[in-house]
Image (tube, helix red, strand yellow):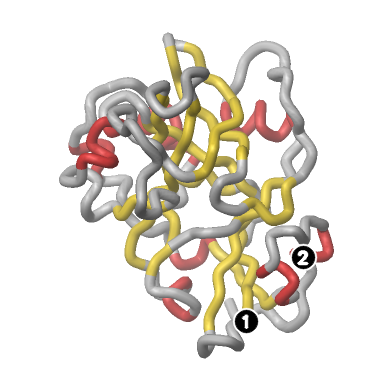
Amino acid sequence: MCGRFWASLSWEEYRDLLNLLGDPPGTNFEPNWNAAPTHDVLVCNERGGVRRLEKMNWGLVPVWAKEPLKFSTINAKSETIEEKATWKGSLNNMRCVIPVSGFYEWRGPKGNKQPFAIKRRDGIAMLLAGLWAFNDRINKDGVRSFAIITCPANETMGEIHTRMPIILDPADLDLWLSTAPWGAGHRVLMRACPDDWLTAFPVSKDVGAVRNNNPVLIEPVGAAIF
């Protein structure tokens, strides 16, 4: 799964990573060192032929929902996105990427889990594959929301957890964000990234409290495990 991440990118980094055009959107680019479900975070999608970077709420609310869902929709399993109604409505033309600096994951016994920060070994930001939706049935003003797609962990990430977010190669960004109908080209992207992309190191347990949001959270408290 993927339930926490951090994003500390500047507008220039977003622009270059996502091939955005024009001026920066009128939004807050302050770093978020501890993004959690229900937070509004920056997400990239395409609407009307325009690639956009905009705030969306983490926890997808399908277009058909008339009341808040009673189950978690922060993650969509790649194995079932073509089957479940929650995700099917977004597959064809409501795909998105969540640009992040890295994500957190925990391992260990209940009550004494150790958090790890996972990021790309080459230092560039991660492009997490996602789905988004717009719902104006629950709130008359409407809300844009998203889910991060996960898959079985690769061998490296498997040292920490059985699942991981799908991290796209920047070369696949145009295909993923296009409004082309879902097909074989998209399915092939539903896999774990190469093992050598990632590095992980233990960080402070303070990251477990959402109220903590500062760069100290990503400082190593031990040696990298990969």
Badge number at residue 8: none
Residue 120 shows up from this direction: no
Q: Is residue 100 above or below residue 92?
A: below
What residue lies at 69% left-to-right and 18% top-to-bottom? 25
Q: Earlier in the sequence, mark 1 or mark 2?
A: 1
**Residue that carries the numbered disc 2 in the rendered image:** 217
- Tell me the amino acid under the disc marked 1: Gln
Q: Nearer the viewer, residue 197 or 132?
A: 132
> How many neighbours does mark 2 have within 10 angstroms: few (below 14), some (14-19), or many (20 or more)?
some
The quadrant holding residue 43 is: top right
Q: In this view, does 199 lie above or below 151?
A: below
Position in image of residue 119 (x %, y %): 61, 60
Residue 171 visible in rendering: yes
In this rendering, the answer to whether 29 lies above or below 23 is: below
Seen at 42% across and 57% down, the residue is: 193
State the mark number for residue 114.
1
